[in-house]
Amino acid sequence: MEKHASMTRLLHPHVAPQAGGAPLVTPIHQTSTYELPRTDEAARIAAAVAPTGYYTRYGSPNAREAEAMLADLDGAEAALLVGSGMAAVSAALLSTVAADPGEILAQKSHYTGTLTLLQEMLPAFGRQVRLVPQEELAAAAGRQTRVVYVETPSNPTMTLTDLRAVRAAAPDAIIIADNTFATPYNTRPLDFGVDLVVQSATKYLNGHSDVTAGVVTGSAALIAKAWETARVLGPVCHPFEAWLLARGLKTFPLRMARHNANGLAVARFLAGHPAVRAVHHPGLPSHPQHDLAVRQMRGHGGMLAFTVADADAAVRVLRATKLCRNAVSLGGPETLITHPASLVFAHQSAEELAASGVDATMLRLSVGLEEPEDIVADLAAALSTVD
Ligand SMILES: Cc1ncc(COP(=O)(O)O)c(C=O)c1O
């Protein structure tokens, strides 16, 4: 009998109240559920939008902490943290298109997961989606447009969307902007009239290549709808990931300043290299939308794409770098190089690839936080193999 009681006690450990001061850093609330008060308060918590201390799929103290930081960075009323950037894109889009049969207008150039959602999944649910060349988005918007989905700069072509022009062209539509590449350090889309911002927090926001997460920011009313969608679809950002994200966010402005400086230094080096055909970086005056980049972005980030003579040369450069690591993803401390045509667009057809402005001569760089001279030296050595 005593053995039985001790085994039961294993499941109900006595947790002593904490002596001394409160922890400086929020502890990780690694629990899936919460003991509720034995009063009517329990039902009130259960019925609330995004309650804290109810059930971890509905939110956690760690997610709430990161959400408060992220809403503040974006100048938003509210934020919703979810388990990946694609979960943020899906929650934002599905929550806004659910009630309205009107047109969804988007770009031909988007992150590939977003393209699949727009081109295959939403039409399969009977939604009308029109994709237009990115620079023509504002001109294509009209009264029939209910939702406009933009990504600026877009992955991987670094093409920009003029947010103010889109707002003016579609005054009644809900505009959703993927701000993963720019980040709120460089552009705050809500300041330009956008309604909802989505970001892969996997990238610059966390900044350490060790978390997968996503965030939606906007008005409290739109975030409540996005939360309801995410509550049903279930893409949770777990407490440890949310804790890591809140930790990473503390150095976000310092990292972004360095990414901006390093990105420009590497772009300038590549633009002057004889083996490089074109460099796509909004900070270069040669970028066709440089004026817009200056108006809409405080700095131009660490992302860039460049092209070399042919597909074979691109693969040779990719394989010759040593410091720049061959990996997808972006926004981490280490410089990553990738070949979008064969890796990032692996799930897309050749036509979709071409429509996105990607070809096999293109390489994408996520310029990291290393000494810029070291990144340049590594690229110079790799480019000498095709010079
Ligand atoms: C612009 C953009 N949006 C969304 C995503 C999706 O983010 P995640 O991989 O965190 O789902 C990515 C991923 O690379 C991206 O580049």
Image (cartoon, grey):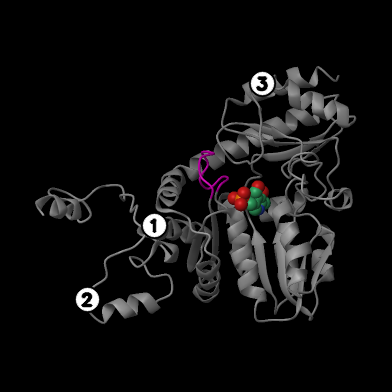
- Count neighbours of disc 2 (C-alpha within 10 A) and say few if under 14, some if 14 to 19, many if 20 or more: few
Residue 295 pos. (x, y %): 69, 55
Mark 2 and ligand 1: say if the CB distance to the nearest ligand atom is below 8 Å: no
Residue 1 visible in this rendered orientation of the protein:
yes
Residue 324 pos. (x, y %): 66, 27
Q: Earlier in the sequence, mark 1 or mark 2?
A: 2
Q: Residue under circle 1? A: 65
Amino acid type for the residue under numbered disc 2: Arg
Q: Residue under circle 3? A: 322
The span from disc 3 to disc 2 (Cα, nearest Å) is: 60 Å
Q: Residue at x 59, y 59 (%)?
A: 87
The span from disc 1 to disc 3 (Cα, nearest Å) is: 38 Å
Image height check: is 182 above or below 274? below
Direction from residue 197 to residue 273 in the image, left or right: right
Q: Which mark is residue 287?
A: none
Q: How many marks?
A: 3
In magenta stretch: residue 210: yes
Residue placed furthest toward the left: 2
| Extent of the magenta region | 202-212
Image height check: is 190 above or below 42? above
Q: Residue at x 75, y 80 (%)?
A: 102
- Which of 226/152 is in front? 226
Q: Earlier in the sequence, mark 3 or mark 2?
A: 2
- Which of 380/54 is in front? 54
Magenta stretch mostly in which secondary structure? Answer: loop
Amino acid type for the residue under numbered disc 1: Glu
Mark 1 and ligand 1: say if the CB distance to the nearest ligand atom is below 8 Å: no
Q: Earlier in the sequence, mark 1 or mark 3?
A: 1
Q: Residue under circle 2? A: 38
Q: SS for tag 3?
A: loop
